Image (cartoon, coloured by chain):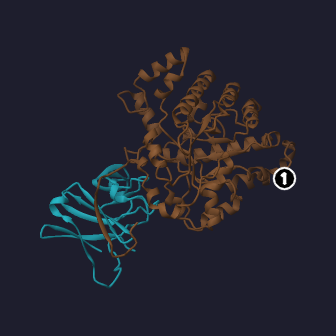
């Protein structure tokens, strides 16, 4: 960036709504050089057509039918498409930036800037897998996704993969973990946490935790806009705009799952298992921690397995910064992290290249000491995902 | 600050910065001008020139890359009905979609206004006044 106040450069530019260009990283190139940067929530094009070759038998036939139908998530000429379009994109009037899918080349080009040490790939298309009413279908999709991602994205410099599991089929989920855990590029198990009923602490899901603990693979919960979240905590379908759903869906789902896991005593049964919450922002963390602590005083006997108060467990959870709330003052983020004691657990996440992605400037604008900034930008994530420093 | 009147920012004389020959800056195009550390976005909208501070206050995305379109309004003038308005005069941030009136720099839906700059055309050349 030119720093001489008299220097002038003029260039012709074109309108752009292409988030994969990611020019914000260039802006901070010098400031970030030498720091370990781990982007813990990155997405690539994983639309269902890529899964087709990885599906077998009647699932493949049904997938072919799905892909040939005119419902492809794009606006078409049927009311079904219109409803789907409005439901997912809201009343955005085609306002840019639309979510652009990043190709493998886009990802490689972003990594070649040399600023980000590691990108952790999380699913996009499969995040609503918890809603699928047929567990076998959900499991087949997860299997196809995982094999596709490993085949397509292994051995890429600095690129690591979170495999996905279908929570409604815990046995198949555990098999997926067993199948991929030893792969050097697989660093986490993503549990899509919306639409999961009962909540994820239920004994039904313990095979997933058992398998993850067996392989020392951390669990990452990742939400979506919970539009059809028709179970506890709220009938989110009653929110009629995407803004409301997006604002409340992610943190509500995250609080529900944290509460469920902690109250079920999972941290005691699986003491070495690490958990992270992604894409839900940060501000609700003190709320759930200390709200539960207050109730714990009265209702401890409902969960006799707990050996400490809830916040003592939740403090160990890792949390991705995206979608970082718009805090009004530059010192607010450090204060918030103090409040939930997240100095060693908060991890920078961009959600690149989705439309609500955080530019790194959104994090850099907050004041904090350099030790904390280094931890959030990379050191905490290295520890969570078991990665070696590259700088 | 009243929206109509922008306070005087400085007493020293304005700086004239050559942007481009008029022929190279036709309607529908835009230029990004970096003056020291300050980025300025300059637009030719149907022959009228507009220049605004070039970085979105939200997360610093470059506003020169924003699309120009309309937006929805709903106020007493529309009898509280939602209407599409300001077609072609709303600058939409390429980062996350914050919208600005290209003429005034005022953000739609925020108590926030971008600094604007004068642009003059003299002898077939476009200059920015900072």
Answer whether residue B104 is visible to the viewer in this image: no
Vertical placement of A143 versus A115: above or below? Answer: above
Vertical placement of A387 versus B15: above or below? Answer: above
In x, y percent, where is residue A145? 55, 30
Q: Residue at x 36, y 79 (%)?
A: B9
Q: Residue at x 43, y 41 (%)?
A: A105
Give the quadrant of residue A211.
top right
- Horizontally, residue A39 falls left or right of residue A173, namely left
Answer whether residue B35 is visible to the viewer in this image: yes
Residues B84 and A310: in front is A310
Q: Colour of chain B?
A: cyan
Chain letter of the residue carrying label 1: A
Residue at disc 1, secondary structure: helix
Mark 1 crowdedness (10 Å alpha carbons): few <14, some 14-19, many ≥20: few
In x, y percent, where is residue B19? 23, 67
- Horizontally, residue A166 falls left or right of residue B86, namely right
Q: Residue at x 49, y 44 (%)?
A: A242
Q: Which residue is mark 1?
A: A297
């Amino acid at each position: 960036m030119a720093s001489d106040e008299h220097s002038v450069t003029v260039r012709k530019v074109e309108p752009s709504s292409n988030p994969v260009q990611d020019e914000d990283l260039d802006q901070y190139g010098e400031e970030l050089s030498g720091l370990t940067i781990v982007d813990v929530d990155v997405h690539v094009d994983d639309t269902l057509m890529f899964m087709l070759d990885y599906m077998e038998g009647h699932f493949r036939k049904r997938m072919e039918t799905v892909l040939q139908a005119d419902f492809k998530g794009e606006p078409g000429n049927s009311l079904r498409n219109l409803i789907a379009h409005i439901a997912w994109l809201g009343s955005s009037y085609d306002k840019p930036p639309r979510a652009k899918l990043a190709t493998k080349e886009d990802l490689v080009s972003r990594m070649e800037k040399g600023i980000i040490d590691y990108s952790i790939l999380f699913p996009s298309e499969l995040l609503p897998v918890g809603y699928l009413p047929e567990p076998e279908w959900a499991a087949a999709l997860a299997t196809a996704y995982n094999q596709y991602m490993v085949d397509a994205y292994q051995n890429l410099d600095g690129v690591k993969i979170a495999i996905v599991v279908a929570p409604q089929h815990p046995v198949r989920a555990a098999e997926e973990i067993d199948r991929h855990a030893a792969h050097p590029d697989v660093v986490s198990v993503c549990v899509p946490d919306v639409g999961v009923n009962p909540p994820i602490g239920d004994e039904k899901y313990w095979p997933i935790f058992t398998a993850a603990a067996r392989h020392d693979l951390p669990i990452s919960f990742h939400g979506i806009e919970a539009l059809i979240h028709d179970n506890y905590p709220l009938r989110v379908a009653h929110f009629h705009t995407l803004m409301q759903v997006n604002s409340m869906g992610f943190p509500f789902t995250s609080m529900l799952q944290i509460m469920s896991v902690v109250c079920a005593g999972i941290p005691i049964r699986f003491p070495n298992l690490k958990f992270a919450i992604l894409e839900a922002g940060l501000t609700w963390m003190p709320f759930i921690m200390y709200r539960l602590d207050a109730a714990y005083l009265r209702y401890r006997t409902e969960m006799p397995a707990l050996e400490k108060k809830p916040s003592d467990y939740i403090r160990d959870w890792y949390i991705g910064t995206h979608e970082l709330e718009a805090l009004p003052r530059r010192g607010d983020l450090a204060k918030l992290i103090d409040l939930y004691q997240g100095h060693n657990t908060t991890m920078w996440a961009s959600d690149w290249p989705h439309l609500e992605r955080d530019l790194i400037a959104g994090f850099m604008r907050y004041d904090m000491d350099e030790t904390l900034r280094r931890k959030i930008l990379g050191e905490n994530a290295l520890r969570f995902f078991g990665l070696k420093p590259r700088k | 600050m009243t929206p109509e009147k922008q306070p005087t920012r400085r007493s020293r004389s304005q700086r004239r910065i050559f942007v481009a020959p008029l022929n190279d800056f036709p309607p529908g195009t835009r230029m990004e001008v970096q003056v020291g550390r300050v980025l300025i976005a300059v637009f030719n909208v149907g022959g009228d020139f507009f220049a605004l501070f070039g970085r979105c206050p939200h997360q610093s995305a470059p506003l020169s890359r924003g699309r120009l379109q309309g937006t929805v309004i709903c106020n007493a003038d529309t009898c509280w009905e939602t209407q599409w308005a300001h077609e072609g005069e709303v600058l939409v941030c390429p980062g996350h979609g914050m919208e600005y009136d290209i003429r005034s720099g005022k953000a739609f839906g925020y108590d926030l206004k971008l600094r604007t700059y004068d642009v003059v055309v003299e002898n077939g050349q476009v200059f920015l006044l900072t």
